[in-house]
Amino acid sequence: MSRVRDKWAKMMLVRCYRAKLSVWAALCVLVLCWFYVFPGDRLPADKEIVEEVLRQGDAWHRNQTGIDLHRKLMTECCNPQRMFAVTKANSPPGKVLWYDGEFYHSHTVNNDTHSLFAQDNPLQLPLKKCAVVGNSGILRDSGCGKDIDQADFIMRCNLPPLSKEYVKDVGTRTHLVTANPSIIEKRFQNLLWSRKHFVESMKAYGSSYVYMPAFSTKPGTELSLRASYALADSSSNLTVLFAHPDFLRAAGNFWKARSVRARRLSTGLFMVSLALGLCEEVTAYGFWPFSIDLDKRPVSHHYYDNMQPQTWFHAMPEEFLQIWHLHKSGVLRLRLGRCPPQEGGS
């Protein structure tokens, strides 16, 4: 009798398990059908993006009302005019800087770090004609170098190479270049063995500002300070600015509210955000995170290599769609493909 009960109990458990599986399977099918029928959050495929860009053509019309609106929005959310960099004015000794890339970690400004900060925002505002240069492979054979160099203020991302073979596509001038601690770690071995290679390679950026997120993560603080000391000890013409974590956090929240869902914004979108808040006119180059270009040919991830990013960390396609929307609405100009010869980019 007990065997019969045990067998019956097992049969009921199997039936319940199968029923649960059926319910979950049905829910999964419903969810898939919902996204198929209502693909509001579906990212367009690479070919769809190419076709959309080609349909748009070269026509672009400046929208001063939209530009003013976005500058106002960036000012209200992020206050880049005062907060884009950590300064003596906004971060006195004793100020607690909460890391924007980590929870429950902070840095309390002391006399040593305070001495490294600029007195106040060193930029002469408003900046007029700004170029924000990403590193996408779409810059290859673009001929945009002269176009970029004609801007009044040029922002570059993550210490890109500006050697002779790239000049015609990316230009030579730089006013601000970002340097993520991860680059110091990987490319320059944490500056533990030799600082000479780092100092020599930085000469490509002339007398520009080096913009570092020193207070985004705890390990990044030491690396960023080490890079700052290395440049100071070599009497470099470069000026190190540390990104204010409050600005980075606010900019991240601004774009997350506009459907950019990622663990962290890319450096490129941070720079676009900064330019929208500080510049009268913005042109973006080298923003194209897709596998094919406008001629439907394969395109490398960077103009100088094809090293792929961690796909879970950034949301590059979503970011591009936001920048593309700004282009279509006349807020900034996005250069894709070849730049017209002898044109100033406006």
Image (cartoon, helix red, strand yellow):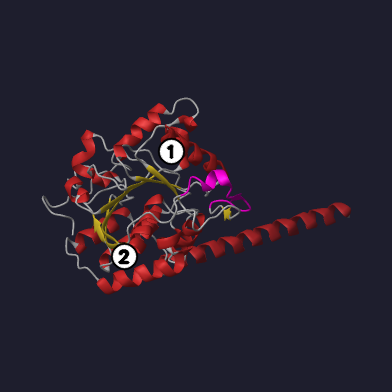
Is 322 left or right of 54, judged from the image as shown?
right
Residue beneath disc 1: 183
Q: Which mark is residue 328?
A: none
**338 vs 198: above or below:** below
Which amino acid type is marked by label 1? Ile
Task: Name the quadrant containing residue 333.
Answer: bottom left
**Number of numbered discs on residues:** 2
Q: Give the label, 1 or 2, closer to the camera.
A: 1
Is 106 one of the magenta-colored residues? yes
Is 63 left or right of 221, judged from the image as shown?
left
Q: Secondary structure at mark 2?
A: helix
**225 vs 343: above or below:** above
Q: Residue furthest bottom?
A: 65
Q: Which mark is residue 325?
A: 2
Percent x, y for residue 26?
55, 64
Q: Residue furthest top?
A: 193
Label 2 Cα neighbours within 10 Å, binned few <14 / some 14-19 / many ≥20: some
Q: Residue furthest right?
A: 1
Whichever of callouts 1 and 2 sits on the residue coming sooner in the sequence is: 1
Q: Is residue 238 visible?
A: yes
**Residue bounds of the magenta highlight:** 101-117
